[in-house]
Every structure is written in C-alpha cells, then in structure tokens.
Amino acid sequence: MSHNILIVAEHDGSTLSLATAKCVACAATVPGAHITIAVCAADAAAVAAQAAALAGVERVLTVEHPLHAHPLAAAIAPQIAALAGPYSHVFGPSSTFGKDLMPRVAALLDTAQVSDIMAVESATRFRRPIYAGNAIITVEVLEGAKVVGTVRTASYQAAGTGGHAAIEAAAPGVEPPAHTRFVSVSTAGGDRPDLQTAAKVVSGGRALGSAESFQILYRLAAKLGAAVGASRAAVDAGYAPNELQVGQTGKIIAPELYIAIGISGAIQHLTGIKDARTIVAINKDPEAPIFEVADIALVGDLFEIVPQIEQLIG
Amino acid sequence: MKRILVGIKRVVDYNVRIRVKPDGSGVLTEGVKMSVNPFDEIALEEALRIKERGAAEEVIVLTVGPADCQTQLRTCLAMGADRALHVQSDTALEPLVTARVLRALIEREQPFLVLLGKQAIDDDNGQTGQMLAALWDRPQATFASKLDIADGKARVTREIDAGLETLEVDLPAVVTVDLRLNEPRYVKLPDIMKAKKKPLETLTLESLGVVARAQLKTLHFEPPAQRHKGVRVKDAAELVAALKQKGLL
Ligand SMILES: Cc1cc2nc3c(=O)[nH]c(=O)nc-3n(C[C@H](O)[C@H](O)[C@H](O)COP(=O)(O)OP(=O)(O)OC[C@H]3O[C@@H](n4cnc5c(N)ncnc54)[C@H](O)[C@@H]3O)c2cc1C
C-alpha cells in the first residue's frame, strides 16, 4: 500500500534545517512512502531548492506569505491543515519548531498526535519514549485517522541529497491570523558548532560554579572542534544560555562523543544523551549516577583535569 | 471578572525511578509518590503572581482525571488558587480530549489567559496547549520563560532551539510555560488548612459535552536499551589515550 506523507520544513528563511532531512529519513521507513515537503516562507525559493534535492523527496510545495517570515505556529498550522487532505501522514521534527506547530496542526485535523517518533514499525505503529526516556511504548494509530507525528531527530541519520523533486507553488487559500506577532529573537551562539548536529559535545554542570569558569569548557571545546552543552542547573544559574541545555526539557542529542563535566547525571539530563556513541564523565563523586552510563569514567576534580586534557591534546 | 485558567496534571513525582512492569502492560505506579506536574506548578505560580500584581482577579485551577487528583487540586488551592474544577475521568485521556475539556470550560469561565505546563513529565506529549489554542482559534505562546501582560496583549519570551524568541499575542491566549519562568512558592501549613474551605467543583465529561474518544492505542511498554558498562581511567593521560584508541581524538 502506498502512503502519501507530508513533511513540514523547518528553516530560517534561507537554509533548510537538518531536522527536516531527518524527518525525511523517518518518513522513508513508512512502507510505500511518497514524500512531499511543504515550505511556508516569505520567499520560499532557496529553501524549496534544498528540500527538492533531498533523496527520497518527490514533491515540494511552497506557500508564500509575508507572515511566514518567522515560524509562527498560529500562521503555519492552518496552511498545513489545508494542504493535508491527500496525505495519510503529516510529520514535523521534534524541535521547538515542530513541538510548537504540530499539535496545532493535529487539532485542526481533529486527530491525535504521536510525539517523538523514534521508530516506525508499520504505517500506523510507532515507538516513542515516555517518562523522560525511562520507558518506550509502542502505539497504534487507530484505523482511518490521519497520522500526525513529530520525529525524534536524534533517532535518525539525515537523508542524503541527490534528489530532484518537482517544486510547485500551493495555494491553500488560507489567510493566516494576525493575532500573533514576532518581536525578536536572540542567540548567544556565535559561530561555534551547533549543539544539535555536532559530532562532539563538551557539556558542563553546576560544578563549574560561574559563567567565567564555564570558559574553560569553551576552550576545551574549541580544541576538540566540539559544541558546548550544559545541564539545567548550569543554565538556571546563568553559567550558560538556555539553548545549550541538554535533556528532557532541553535538547536531545546523539553525538559521537559526549563529555559530561561536573554533571551528576539526573534522569532528566541522561534522556538527552542516551543516543551518544561514547559518553565520557568527569566527576569528583565516584557514586555520581552519570558513571552508570559513562563509557569512560574519570573520578576527580574538573578544575585540575580539564586543563590537563587541554595540554595533552595540544 | 478577569480570570486566569490553569490546567494541571497529577503525575508520578519527578524523583521516582520509573520501572516498567515485567509483562509490558504499563509502568509501576502502585504506591509511588504523585505530584503536580512540575511545569504546571510553574504555570500556577505565574497566574498567582499576575493576580498579585493586580492584573487578574481570579485564578481557577482545573484537572481532568480520577478522584485521586483532588489531592493535587488541594495543593494548588493551598498555593493560592481561588477555586478548583475537577473533571472526572477514570481512564487516561488523549491530549486532544483534554483540550476539548479545556475548550468547554473556557466557554463557561471566559478567562483572558490560559496557562499550562509545556509538557507533562509522564507522557511527555507536549500537545494540550497547542491543541487548545487551535480549537479555540486563539494565539499560543509555548515554552514561555518570561510573560508580561498589558493593554490586552501578552509579550512572551520563549525558549527555542536557537535561543530566546519574543512574541506579542492578543488576549485571550494560551501560554505554555517552561522551567525558568519562575520558582513556585512553598505551601505553608495554614494555607493547607485554608485550602480545605475553598470551592472544589466536580464535573463530568458528559456535562461538558465532551466524548472521551481514543485514537491511539498503547500496545506495549518496555524499558529503554541499557548502555554497556564502561571503563574507569585514573587520570587525564589515560583518558586522552582511551579517546585516541577509539579514534575520537
Ligand atoms: C521537570 C524537570 C525537567 C528537567 N529537565 C532537565 C534537562 O532537560 N536537563 C538537565 O540537565 N536537567 C534537567 N532537570 C534537572 C535535573 O533533575 C538536575 O537537577 C540537573 O540535571 C542537575 O544538574 P547538574 O548535574 O549540573 O548539577 P548537580 O546535580 O548539582 O551535579 C553537580 C555534579 O558536579 C560534581 N562536582 C562538583 N564539583 C566538582 C568538581 N570540582 N569536579 C568534578 N565534579 C564536581 C558533583 O559531584 C555533582 O555530581 C529537570 C528537572 C525537572 C524537575
């Protein structure tokens, strides 16, 4: 049986997010998948071209409106709902963009949502984590309902390129509401590697003690070509900006290497790093729960160890 | 009357280590500590602060669930909510149904603001607020870490993957809250006594015209894959050597 799948593109106006390519990878595991990507933008051309080049994508639909210059869920959801008719599945990434948008789409379609899909078992059966990843459930979407889902991007490798999908302008005939207005966005990031896609991540916890001390992690990360992450305690204390938070309520990441420094390993943190290939933990408490998941464990004082590592790798 | 409606959920306390039942039929919840979902507590705290600033006159707290939920509603009344609504349901409802309940109660209570947690820490669905906003055809501002209300509008700072985004929405609206919005107050003993006298109304789904439709069926629960036991190294030099051996340096 064939299934038409609509994926909502995440982008910043010029670049398609890697999360979208991961949604394509997930959608491609639905039996008989025919994949379409919808791009809502003020000017969709550049993003649509990138979407059309993804392997496995057959069609790209563009919806242009000045209100789509910023990703407002209230404006995008009715467009997607209006386009959704011919599709059995509507997917978006489990990023803050998709988490904000997709339930609004689901409600407009009068259908349930499957959040954080980590595996597709059949066209209607999915695996997803609950309780901060402490249990995995298999859910079945009952007969006849459209499947609206968010894709747990850490569970998928991004789809490659080489595709040549047709790009069409869609006219859903919806006037997005004006009741929600974008004011501003601020990012502390700079040009460091992106936490969500970096192969290596150096992450710090409450033990760092101050924003100044946190700088030793930025230095180590720079030497390793790594992104920087943080525990909630470190973010709450103002040592690191919120976009660096890793965990149940922060980012779920799957780097090759995760180095947890002065992080105790609360379940809410661990759920964010379960898919990391290698976890290194540095903690002065030999009983810290982080050691239960660490591939390489080093008990000791981070303020001694981190500078030593830095020297050793030169 | 200027009202804020706050939705809360009774969940397994965040400190409890969750265990899956051996037969895969669910997680063990017998005898474990239950609490107000931490995000919802923050939503309530925010509502109380808005009221204390004089920008609202009444804070209504509501939940959908079995009779036991009244314990958590009493906690919310002790924190300072003015009254509570308990919509009875002995089966767990899907977020879309909960959103319909909220929608029906909005019709009745006419709040200018609905505050909810951004997700419940049991199902981790993160859907109810956005679904409600869609059904209500009103603005949503999710993952709020700052909320200002003035002149019939809310200015909301949201924690997003890229950093912090600020939106302005017309009221009424739905705002879902993130952890850094505030720190909820502690409940004091006299408040617990006072809360016993505050109104707690029990309603049924039927009386609200909501059908407990299920579109999803959970077939199976299992524990997550375990990671392999790692190695201990004794110093920075051994650590660096181990990373080199794995090809990570
Ligand atoms: C609803 C909810 C959601 C949450 N979501 C998240 C989330 O997304 N992400 C998250 O991270 N947390 C989250 N938390 C918080 C989580 O429960 C923990 O409180 C938090 O992760 C602790 O951060 P930490 O490990 O940095 O701090 P702590 O637990 O205080 O640990 C600090 C560690 O540093 C070690 N240490 C101290 N000094 C040194 C030194 N000199 N050298 C080496 N080690 C040292 C200590 O031994 C300790 O293990 C959430 C909590 C709740 C209730």
Image (cartoon, helix red, strand yellow):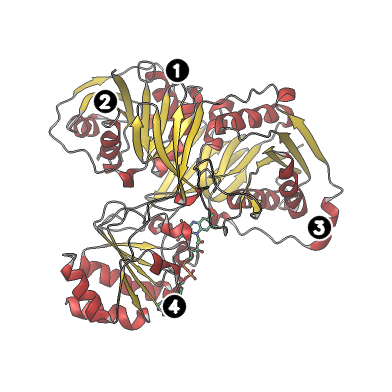
SS state under label 4? loop
| Residue B47 x, y percent position in the rendering | 67, 48
The residue nearer to you, when weighing A42 against B12, is B12
Residue at image location 38% in from the left, 82% down from the top: A301
Q: CA distance from mark 3 to mark 2?
A: 56 Å
- In the figure, B241 relative to A224: above or below? below
Residue B102 lies in what quarter of the image? top right
Report the residue marked by disc 1. Answer: A144
* Contact between labelled residues 3 and 1, with CB atoms less than 8 Å apart: no
Comparing labels 3 and 4, the label whose residue is closer to the camera: 4
* Contact between labelled residues 2 and 3, with CB atoms less than 8 Å apart: no
Q: Are marks 1 and 3 on the same chain?
A: no
Amino acid type, label 1: Gly
Q: Are marks 4 and 1 on the same chain?
A: yes
Amino acid type, label 2: Ile
Which chain does tag 4 point to?
A
Characterize the local packing of mark 2: few (<14), some (14-19) or many (20 or more) Cα atoms within 10 angstroms: many
Q: CA distance from mark 2 to mark 4?
A: 49 Å
- In the figure, B246 relative to A243: above or below? below
Which chain does tag 3 point to?
B
Comparing labels 2 and 4, the label whose residue is closer to the camera: 4
Can the viewer see residue B180 in this picture?
A: yes
| Residue A47 x, y percent position in the rendering | 24, 34
- In the figure, B233 relative to A74: above or below? below
Residue at image location 73% in from the left, 32% down from the top: B109
Instruction: Farthest residue to the front: give it.
Output: B23
Whether ligand 1 has any atom under 8 Å from the Cβ at mark 4 is answered as yes
Report the residue marked by disc 3. Answer: B191
Q: CA distance from mark 1 to mark 3?
A: 50 Å
The residue nearer to you, when weighing B214 against A111, is B214
Report the residue marked by disc 2. Answer: A35
